[in-house]
Image: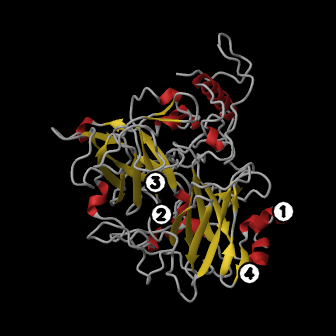
Amino acid sequence: MTAQHPPPPAEPGSAAPHAQPVPPPPPHGATARGDAPPLSPAPSQADIDEAIGAAHARAAHAATRDHPPRDFPPYRSSALRHPLAAPLPLRDPEAVELRGPVFGVTDVTALDSDLTRRHHAEPLGERITVTGRVLDRRGRPVRGQLVEVWQANASGRYAHRLDQHPAPLDPHFTGFGRCLTDDEGRYAFTTIKPGAYPWRNHTNAWRPAHIHFSLFGDAFAQRLVTQMYFPGDPLFPYDPILRSVTDLAARERLVADYDHELSVPEWSLGYRWDIVLDGPAATWCEEGRAR
Amino acid sequence: MTEPTAAAPAAMPLPPTPSQTVGPFYGYALSFAGGGDLVPAGHPEALTLHGYVFDGAGEPVPDALLEFWQADPAGATAGAPGSLRHDPATGQVVGRDTVRFTGFARVPADADGHWTLRTLAPGPHRPAAVPYLALLLFARGLLHHLHTRVHLPEHAEALAAEPEFAALPPERLNTLLAVREAERRYRFDLRLQGEKETVFCDFPLGPHQPPGAAPVPGAR
């Protein structure tokens, strides 16, 4: 695990000088992995570790560290894609963003939550179930809302044409699913455990295995897109995307629990991951809301 | 299990699950056919809203994802299901039913950073409210999504008079206004960073509670 060391020049014993901050990528980063291009001198893992330490030190004074700062230099693609101005706070209790889109039985089919049954045969990999509850910050369940997931296959490759990582595609796995939460806010997916994969943020950059989640609350202001990680992954200390969440306790909220009670004998391993949506809920209209 | 139950809601607000970037590979999962068509082509009242997303170097962002949420022309914000309506035989998304206005759209930017939305003009969501479309932007490189609002130019004066926007200089306020290009066609560009940076907004919890809302149990 990388220590939270201060910014340069404190680097005793370091092999390479790191006087320069991590260079931003050139404007056009569209490459095989869709990230930083291969032509720029790629930083080393040590460069990235140091930049993470510096960014964490800067963030230590932030009022809240629940979410990543949008300006996070170790994740190089953030360099030109974060606003410089602070967001304008809006507190209108009748803002359109305090209501949100609704979804129903026409939007999701029963098969959509099983990512292993989309093709004519079973995908390769370790079959898992992932379940949990979607709650608002007061602990109330988010009912009847859309949960979407997408992920790489067991070999660490996405079924996306721009992903040219030389790992095999699986003809029996595409890797996306949808479901609606039930009256307790519960969601459940059956899938296979995704593989780790390399990317081009820096030399020898690897993403820990993760499942992308997209979540809706009752209010558009509660919208969340995030990633779920698997417990005990040895790649956690090296990943600038997970570590963009500068608070350890907040980072741990992105890691699912292995739950033996959820494992199905002779069939699948079970993971539990509860999700709490930030932002104001639509308290003022909840009674009148059709479900 | 440690999760709170419905009978005993958490006394203190729960800490939220952090955001993470949408990444580059959402395209086969989140994008869906007709995602930007809130009304069908040829609808007599349809208006087209389109634009580009630019990064801090002025380059287009080819892998941005935009979502829109809006009131219907009468100002109703109840929404309707069916944005992702499926054909049960094939499992494919077949588009909205052309009758119900769902209020929700999702549009991935093209390779040149351009996006297009076909919709109806939102009505005022309360008497005398300035109508707008709520816009949510996701992208690779963006660790936490960004909210902004699209206003049609006929509401420019009313927007400038809104107390919440009063502190913005005119050139910043203008980033929240679409430009009329032709009959029923408007342009709205987003700039993530730097000169002419779009005004983004957020929705902090409190201290203003909605009128009549129950206080948060145990809140300090």
Q: Are marks 3 and 1 in contact (CB under 8 Å)?
A: no
Instruction: Give the secondary structure at mark 3.
Output: strand
Label 2 packing within 10 angstroms: few (<14), some (14-19), many (20+): many
Q: Are marks 1 and 2 in contact (CB under 8 Å)?
A: no
What type is the residue that disc 2 sits on?
Answer: Asp
What type is the residue that disc 3 sits on?
Answer: Ser
Q: Position of residue A278 (x, y in %)?
A: 53, 52
> What is the chain letter for disc 1?
B
Instruction: Give the secondary structure at mark 4.
Output: helix
Residue A218: which numbered mark, if any?
A: 2
Judge whether A42 appears above or below B88 on screen: above
Q: CA distance from mark 2 to mark 4?
A: 30 Å
Q: CA distance from mark 1 to mark 2?
A: 33 Å
User: In the image, is A276 to the left or to the right of B135?
Assistant: left
Instruction: Give the secondary structure at mark 2.
Output: loop
Q: Which residue is mark 3?
A: A214
Q: CA distance from mark 3 to mark 1?
A: 35 Å
What type is the residue that disc 1 sits on?
Answer: Pro
Q: CA distance from mark 3 to mark 4?
A: 34 Å
Judge whether A224 appears above or below A288 on screen: above
Judge whether A122 appears above or below A143 on screen: above
Name the residue at 59% across, 41% down.
A68
Residue B169: which numbered mark, if any?
A: 1
Q: CA distance from mark 1 to mark 4?
A: 19 Å
Residue A254: which numbered mark, if any?
A: none
| Quarter assignment of residue A165 | top left
> What is the chain letter for disc 4?
B
